[in-house]
Image (cartoon, grey):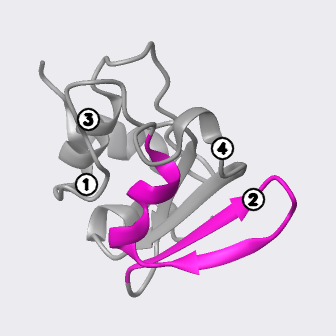
Amino acid sequence: MYIDIETIENSLFLLEHPQLVVLGQFKRGKTTFINALIGINLLPTAVIPLTSVVTILKYGDKPKAFVKFLSGKRSEVTISELKNYTTEGKNPKNIKQVDKVTIEYPPSILKRWCSNN
């Protein structure tokens, strides 16, 4: 698969609040694509379907992760703890009642794309 990063960057800069949404069927490489795009294996991947909740990745000066639960409660967790909330293996059928996870991370590509969001 060929990804023209320059075209993607140019298109996103045209938006006032740039966002890239990755959608697709189960086990089609969405998380692997995102890791490749940002140039780091930040999000967990596996041979079986893995990600079980909405995960938002945005720029931050230092690595941080926040879990928002369906109850409205919000907790900061470490990057290494993310799999406990976002994966089917550690959170089967979302038994932990996670609404979404937000990750802040400092790769320069995220700064260019997401610093206004």
Q: Quadrant of the C terminus?
A: bottom right
In this rendered view, identify the residue nearer to me: 103 or 117: 103
Instruction: Say which of marks 1 and 2 sits in front.
Output: 2
Up the image or down, 84 lies above or below 47; here it is below
Marks 3/2 in contact by CB < 8 Å: the verdict is: no
Q: Which residue is mark 3?
A: 33
Q: In the image, is residue 72 part of the stretch drawn in magenta? A: yes
Q: Residue furthest top?
A: 25
| Distance in Å between CA atoms under marks 1 and 2 | 26 Å
| Percent position of residue 84, x then y | 45, 58
Frontmost of labels 4 and 1 is 4
Q: Disc 3 residue type?
A: Phe
Where disc 2 sits, the SS reads strand
Q: Residue at x 58, y 57 (%)?
A: 101
- The residue mark sitting in front, 4 or 3, is 4
Cα gap from disc 4 to disc 1, whole angstroms: 30 Å
- Comparing 6 with 45, the one in front is 45
Q: Which residue is mark 2?
A: 69
Labels 1 and 2 touching (C-beta < 8 A): no
Distance of label 4 from label 3 (alpha carbons): 27 Å
Q: CA distance from mark 3 to mark 2?
A: 26 Å
Marks 2 and 4 sit apart, C-alpha to C-alpha, by 11 Å
Q: Position of residue 5 (x, y in %)?
A: 22, 40
Residue 16 seen by the camera:
yes
- Marks 2 and 4, the one that precedes in the sequence: 2
Q: Quadrant of the N terminus?
A: top left
The reply, left or right, for residue 35 in relation to residue 24 is left
User: Which residues are drawn in magenta?
Assistant: 63-87
Q: Earlier in the sequence, mark 1 or mark 3?
A: 3
Q: Which mark is residue 38?
A: 1
List x then y, in percent, for residue 56: 54, 53
Does label 1 or label 2 sit earlier along the sequence?
A: 1
